Image (cartoon, rainbow, N blue to C red):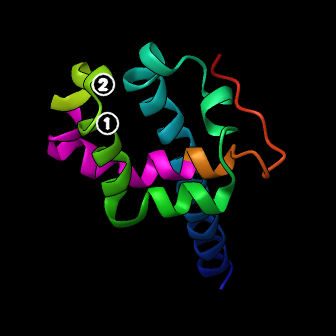
Amino acid sequence: MHTFSAAVVITLLAGSCALNAATYKGQKIYIETCKECHGGGQALAASKKQREWKKIMDNNGDQLAQIHLNSKKAEPAWEYFNNRVYSKNAKHLEDFLVEYAKDSGNVPACN
């Protein structure tokens, strides 16, 4: 019985760590792909409220991709936003942006 209980506890702890990891994955993605143009994550993430980021990031971040694809200034990023990698990473990026949005009270440490 103790072995079973220990296995359940370990599984729950591992699962909770995996759920929290998405924000950190999003922060890493931001640093690797967005920081060059947008600067530190704090300024960009805090530019909108959580609700606004969620709306922009609906449907695997289609609206965010369209904002970049419709901007001549964002031409260096067009290849990234047309790539499956962006679709794969959009959920993690959303977690990061929502976690550090203007109304979240949180501050990222990626500046």
Q: Which mark is residue 74?
A: 2
- At label 1, which amino acid type do we have? His
Instruction: Say if 90 sits above or below 4 in the image.
Output: above
Q: Is residue 16 left or right of residue 85?
A: right
Instruction: Say if 69 sits above or below 90 in the image.
Output: above
Is disc 1 in contact with disc 2, using a CB cutoff of under 8 Å?
yes
Q: Residue 48: image x %, image y %?
A: 65, 46
Instruction: Say if 7 sits above or below 107 in the image.
Output: below
Q: Residue 91: image x %, image y %?
A: 42, 55
Secondary structure of the residue carrying numbered label 2: helix
Instruction: Say if 1 sits above or below 93 in the image.
Output: below
Magenta stretch, main secondary structure, is helix
- At label 2, which amino acid type do we have? Ala
Q: Does residue 91 show up magenta in the picture?
A: yes
For the record, the magenta segment spans: 80-95
Q: Residue 100: image x %, image y %?
A: 69, 43
Secondary structure of the residue carrying numbered label 1: helix
The N terminus lies in quadrant: bottom right
Q: Does residue 84 show up magenta in the picture?
A: yes
Q: Nearer the viewer, residue 102 or 91?
A: 102
Kindly report the distance in space between the C-alpha atoms of the residues bearing marks 1 and 2.
5 Å
Q: Is residue 101 left or right of residue 82?
A: right
* Residue in the picture at 63% in, 38% down: 45
Residue that numbered label 1 is attached to: 68
